[in-house]
Image (tube, rainbow, N blue to C red):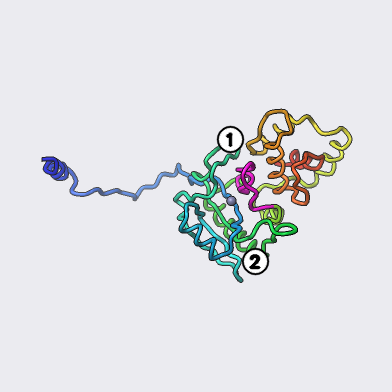
Amino acid sequence: MVLGAILAGCTAPGGPARLEIDRSIQAVSQSSRVSFVVLHYTVADTPRSLEILSRQNVSSHYLITDETPPRVYQLVDESRRAWHAGQSEWYGRSDLNAASIGVEIVNPGPVEGGWAPYSDAQIETLILLLRDVISRHQIHARNVVAHSDIAPQRKQDPGPAFPWKRLAETGIGRWYDESKVAGLKADYQRKGLPPVAVIQEKLRRAGYATPQSGVLDEATRRVLRAFQMHYRPARHDGEPDAETLAILDALP
Ligand SMILES: [Zn+2]
């Protein structure tokens, strides 16, 4: 009886025998669903990274290896969600996996005595990849971010060895107006730093999910550390200082 009803529905008189969709007209009013790029280091080596990112419950759209020359794997189609960002927030928008392209770079991260460098070849490969992704999806400079920018309480990657300034010199990502920093820094050195609530508000306006507690708590220090790793990696101790404040003020 049920089967009979279904069969009858498929063959209703006057109905289509099968679904046909006409795609000959495309609307001019449309844009990409992708608004962000999130960069990561893998910690693991290339074979292990491939295994984890393709067979376990994490993934990324792209993986740049540490081979010579580096190879770029695409593990997830750009139209689909990769699982790389986790709980995350940027400019008040959460769940960045829904609207981002994730790029993992093979790099060990923290090593004894410091942080492992990225090779020039990896960065050059990344720049080529990002140019293409950013132009196809029209991604805003401020939305090219570190995993640590969008999850500062949990994540450190791609770490202070990642050359954000070099990317910015090729037109990728947000950078600050360096000509303004010396003057702003001198002002803060003369007048002293503003109250913590003001610093927290500046970080929030720069995109970071920041407690607005008015207290320099551990969570706020973690946000400061993430900001410093991105914009002032030479010192990323989470301490507010005149240069950090100057850079915050000199961001576009
Ligand atoms: Zn990550």
Q: Residue 145: which numbered mark, if any?
A: none
Q: In the drawing, does residue 131 fall left or right of residue 160?
A: left
Residue at 79% of width from left, 31% of height from top? 194
State how far apart marks 2 and 1 are (Cα): 35 Å
Does the magenta-highlighted stretch encompass residue 154? yes
Q: Amino acid at mark 1?
A: Gly
From the image, which quarter does the N terminus lie in?
A: top left
- SS class, disc 2: helix
Residue at (66, 35) in percent of width and height: 210
- Element marked by disc 1: loop
The answer, for residue 46, to whether it is visible in the render is yes
How far from the left and from the top, in percent, is residue 126? 61, 60
Q: Residues within 10 Å of mark 2 (few under 14, many from 20)?
A: some
Give the labeled residue for mark 2.
Answer: 121
Q: Which residues are magenta?
A: 142-159
In the picture, measured across the screen, residue 114 lies left or right of residue 47, that is: right
The extreme bottom residue here reads 68
Three-letter amino acid code at disc 2? Ala
Pick the front one: 151 or 77: 151
User: Residue 40's spot in the image, x, y percent?
Assistant: 60, 53
In the rendered view, tell whether residue 133 sits above or below residue 248. Answer: below
Q: N-terminal of the two: label 2 or label 1? A: 1
Residue at x-position 50% and y-position 57%: 53
Could you classify mark 1 by the number of other residues whose Cα lies within 10 Å: few (under 14), some (14-19), or many (20 or more)?
Answer: few
The answer to whether residue 121 is above or below residue 191 is: below
Camera-side residue of 241 and 182: 241
Please provide percent x and percent y for residue 29: 45, 42
Task: Using the rendered view, name the quadrant where residue 192 is placed.
Answer: top right
Cβ of mark 1 under 8 Å from ligand 1: the answer is: no
Look at mark 1 in the image and give the residue it sits on: 92
